[in-house]
Image (cartoon, grey):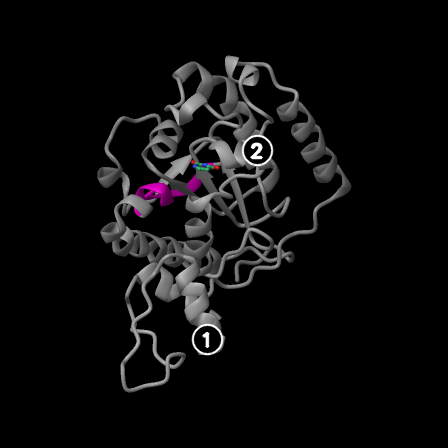
């Protein structure tokens, strides 16, 4: 990436670009103005290992389609009365990484895709910093598929009604690692009221498949509290290293451990 595009990119995600007076404007970006953003502009040497996913069979594709149809016509809780549309998720139909947020906001409700507002742009930058991209190798979904009015916290009965959809998404995706972003997602997925700071920095496990799950800050919180981006970057590096350990020992198609 050339320096000019890099500056443009940093400005787009709201990071100040520092320029030395004596040097041409396009040539200098002070390192670590923001660790998450800085990492996002590094070359992809830090990217997560590329794992060739199993092909999506017709059966898996059909089950995704059925799930999508059900979510879009769901009336299991009162939120269907106020939402514009259900927000299923975005990403490949089978992949190693899954990110889970809380619930769609106004922009997501309007566009039918998770994390497409300001927080979503920051989430994308954070994910790119560890080699992930919603178009290729990470699936992003929410605990709730419908927007709560005025972005209020999800009610327990709404979470209970919606969780089976998330479970089916996990069964279809078979992720190797899940990243819960924000307190609400983490607490609901782990059935706990421990604070986010108590939940960070550990490998939890989720659901029947016992999928490893790591917790980090919600990008909307990071927009309000940029000083904590450094801690979020620690979480992402932790997640990347756990993922590498998990995938260092893979069972090959011949049944042998590699
Ligand atoms: N916040 C979330 O938790 N999810 C979204 O999809 C958007 C904002």
Which residue is situated farthest in the right direction here? Answer: 58
Snapshot quadrant of residue 127: bottom left
Asked if residue 171 lies left or right of residue 198, the reply is right
- Which of pointers 2 and 1 lies earlier in the amino acid sequence? 1
* Secondary element at tag 2: helix
* Secondary element at tag 1: helix
According to the image, label 1 marks what residue?
A: 4
State the image coordinates of residue 135 (x, y, percent, origin top left): 60, 53
Rounded to the nearest angstrom, the CA distance separating label 2 from label 1 is 33 Å
Q: Is residue 56 visible?
A: yes
According to the image, label 2 marks what residue?
A: 110
State the image coordinates of residue 254 (x, y, percent, origin top left): 64, 58
Snapshot quadrant of residue 59: top right
Q: Circles 2 and 1: CB distance less than 8 Å?
A: no
Examine the structure image and report whether residue 218 is included in the region drawn in magenta.
yes
Which residue is situated farthest in the bottom direction here? Answer: 22
Viewer-closest of 34 and 179: 34
Image height of 132 relative to 208, above or below: below
Image height of 24 relative to 12, above or below: below
Numbered circle sitting on residue 36: none
Viewer-closest of 250 and 38: 38
Taking the spot 30% from the left edge, 62% from the top edge, the residue there is 34
Image height of 231 relative to 25, above or below: above
Q: Is the shortest distance between ligand 1 and the CB of mark 2 under 8 Å?
A: no
Asked if residue 113 lies left or right of residue 182, the reply is right
Mark 1 residue crowding within 10 angstroms, few (<14) / some (14–19) / many (20+): some
Magenta residue span: 210-222
State the image coordinates of residue 47 (x, y, percent, origin top left): 46, 65
Taking the spot 32% from the left edge, 86% from the top edge, the residue there is 23
State the image coordinates of residue 177 (x, y, percent, origin top left): 46, 47
């Amino acid at each position: 990436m050339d320096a000019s595009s890099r500056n443009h990119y940093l400005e787009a995600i709201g990071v100040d670009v520092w320029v030395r007076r004596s040097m041409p404007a396009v040539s200098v970006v002070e390192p670590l103005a923001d660790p998450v953003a800085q990492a996002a502009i590094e070359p992809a040497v830090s990217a997560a290992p590329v794992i060739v996913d199993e092909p999506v069979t017709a059966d898996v594709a059909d089950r995704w389609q059925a799930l999508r149809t059900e979510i879009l016509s769901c009336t299991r809780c009162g939120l269907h009365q106020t939402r514009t549309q259900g927000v299923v998720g975005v990403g490949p139909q089978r992949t190693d990484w899954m990110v889970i947020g809380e619930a769609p906001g106004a922009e997501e409700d309007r566009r039918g895709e998770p994390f497409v507002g300001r927080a979503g742009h920051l989430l994308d930058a954070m994910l790119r910093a560890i080699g992930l991209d919603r178009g290729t190798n990470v699936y992003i979904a929410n605990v709730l598929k419908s927007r709560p009015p005025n972005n209020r916290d999800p009610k327990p009965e709404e979470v209970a009604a919606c969780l089976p959809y998330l479970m089916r998404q996990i069964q279809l995706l078979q992720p190797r690692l899940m990243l819960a972003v924000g307190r609400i997602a983490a607490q609901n997925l782990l059935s706990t009221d421990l604070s986010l700071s108590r939940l960070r920095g550990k490998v939890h496990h989720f659901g029947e498949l016992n999928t490893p799950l790591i917790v980090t800050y919600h990008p909307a919180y990071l927009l309000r509290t940029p000083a904590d981006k450094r801690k979020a970057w620690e979480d992402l590096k932790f997640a990347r290293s756990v993922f590498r350990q998990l995938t260092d020992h893979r069972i090959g198609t011949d049944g042998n451990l590699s």
